[in-house]
Image (spheres, rainbow, N blue to C red):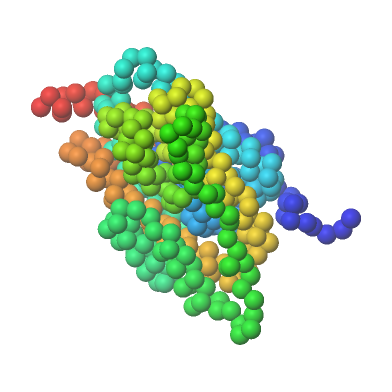
């Protein structure tokens, strides 16, 4: 049998699937900083240092992750697994990335329920939240310098996207689409009478189920979190307002205090921020509640990644698609940059947190090989020591 099919990898990878799975498991175990930092780590480690993934494949994955609903970092991990090892690679890479942080929040959920709250968490978050701002800022800088350079059009898109993110405090998917179409029309316009390869294609959306009072609790949890995973775009933090409306205001599963603690758990644990759904699910319905909530959140993003992935692999090198991806990538980087400001506004509350954020960024700038987990650990210790004094004062 000659020729390649879409199910076959394009080119021979220079790494084994087991190596990629081990990397994703490691990143899920120590990768602090939320989606912005995590996608930056993947670029640094898989594109720049190890050269397992090409720049073009990474940018295609970023574009797809931004266009589809669901958690950004998890979708990119799934897509990078798909690049050379297709559905098996996507499945194993996604599981390896999500599972470590899920087990961590599950353990914290057990402790939280057993001891009636985690008071020390606020002190840890005080330090870690500020340090994360410095980590995210450095990741945004690296993505900007590498993908935008001196391109004026892409800079204009990036700045506009950053401004919209800061003003609206959310990521607008239509801005990503519009940026991609703009660059496509300006740099690789379709020929008269030519076909638009795949721009009309769209991934199927999962229908949002309406929770009914007589449903078993697990079904109700699964329906809500599947809806959240299917219709929330952008970074993990974008899902927080949506979860608050459903978990606290509509279903009354958690109190305001419990919900804030759930978000703090997501921020002080590595891996994707939306893993907080596992913590929430545990508080609502125990172990199986955590499992159902996590599955409801991540299965839609998995489907939204692997279903359109063959199209991206088949047509991703066409000039029109390259231009479209460049535009979406510029808008995504702008949104990430704007998110630094939005998150920083919440996390930097005094001179100590401002100093931690600046010190974290300066340390990573000065010492290129400084591991981020070490920075986060130091910040956590500072928070434990300083926050009680600041609160008392």
Residue extending furthest toward the right: 1
Query: Percent x, y for residue 301?
Result: 54, 46
Quadrant of residue 239 in the image?
top left
Is residue 337 shown above or below 371? below
Quadrant including the N terminus: bottom right
Query: In the image, is 42 to the left or to the right of 393?
Result: right
Quadrant including the C terminus: top left
Can residue 303 be seen here? The reply is: yes
Looking at the image, which residue is at 44% across and 49% down? 232
Query: In the image, is 367 to the left or to the right of 4?
Result: left
Residue extending furthest toward the left: 393
Quadrant of residue 93 in the image?
top right
Query: Percent x, y for residue 209?
Result: 49, 44
Looking at the image, which residue is at 47% across and 65% down? 177
Nearest the camera: 12 or 184?
Answer: 184
Looking at the image, which residue is at 58% across and 55% down? 204
Query: Percent x, y for residue 296?
Result: 52, 38
Is residue 253 shown above or below 113? below
Query: In the image, is 340 to the left or to the right of 86?
Result: left
Looking at the image, which residue is at 16% across and 24% down? 389
Query: In the image, is 376 to the left or to the right of 354?
Result: right
Is residue 241 shown above or below 187? above
Can residue 131 be seen here? The reply is: no
């Amino acid at each position: 049998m000659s020729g390649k099919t879409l199910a076959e990898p394009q080119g021979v990878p220079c790494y084994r699937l087991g190596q990629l799975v081990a990397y994703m498991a490691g990143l899920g175990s120590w990768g602090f900083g939320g989606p912005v930092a995590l996608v930056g780590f993947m670029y640094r480690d898989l594109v720049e240092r190890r050269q397992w993934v090409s720049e073009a494949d990474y940018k295609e994955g970023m574009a797809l992750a931004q266009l589809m609903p669901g958690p950004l970092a998890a979708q990119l991990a799934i897509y990078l697994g798909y690049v050379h090892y297709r559905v098996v690679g996507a499945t194993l890479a996604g599981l390896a990335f999500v599972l470590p942080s899920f087990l961590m929040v599950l353990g914290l959920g057990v402790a939280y329920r057993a001891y009636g709250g985690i008071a020390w968490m606020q002190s840890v978050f005080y330090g870690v939240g500020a340090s994360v701002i410095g980590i995210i800022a450095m990741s945004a800088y690296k993505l900007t310098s590498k993908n935008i350079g001196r391109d004026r059009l892409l800079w204009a898109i990036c700045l506009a996207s950053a401004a919209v993110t800061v003003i609206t405090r959310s990521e607008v998917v239509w801005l990503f689409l519009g940026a991609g179409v703009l660059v496509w029309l300006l740099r690789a316009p379709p020929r008269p009478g030519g076909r638009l390869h795949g721009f009309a294609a769209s991934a199927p959306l999962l229908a949002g189920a309406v929770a009914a009072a007589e449903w078993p609790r697990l079904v109700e949890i699964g329906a809500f979190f599947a809806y959240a995973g299917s219709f929330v775009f952008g970074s993990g933090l974008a899902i927080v307002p949506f979860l608050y409306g459903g978990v606290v205001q509509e279903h009354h599963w958690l109190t305001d205090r419990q919900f804030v603690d759930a978000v703090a758990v997501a921020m002080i644990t590595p891996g994707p921020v939306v893993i907080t759904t596992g913590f929430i699910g545990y508080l609502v319905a125990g172990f199986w509640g955590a499992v159902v909530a996590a599955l409801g959140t991540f299965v839609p993003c998995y489907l939204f990644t692997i279903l359109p992935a063959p199209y991206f692999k088949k047509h991703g090198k066409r000039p029109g698609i390259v231009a479209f991806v460049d535009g979406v990538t510029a808008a995504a980087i702008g949104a990430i940059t704007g998110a630094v400001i939005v998150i920083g506004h919440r996390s930097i509350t005094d001179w100590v947190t401002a100093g931690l954020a600046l010190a974290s960024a300066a340390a990573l700038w000065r010492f290129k090989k400084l591991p981020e987990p070490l920075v986060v650990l130091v910040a956590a210790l500072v928070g434990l020591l300083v926050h009680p004094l600041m609160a008392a004062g």
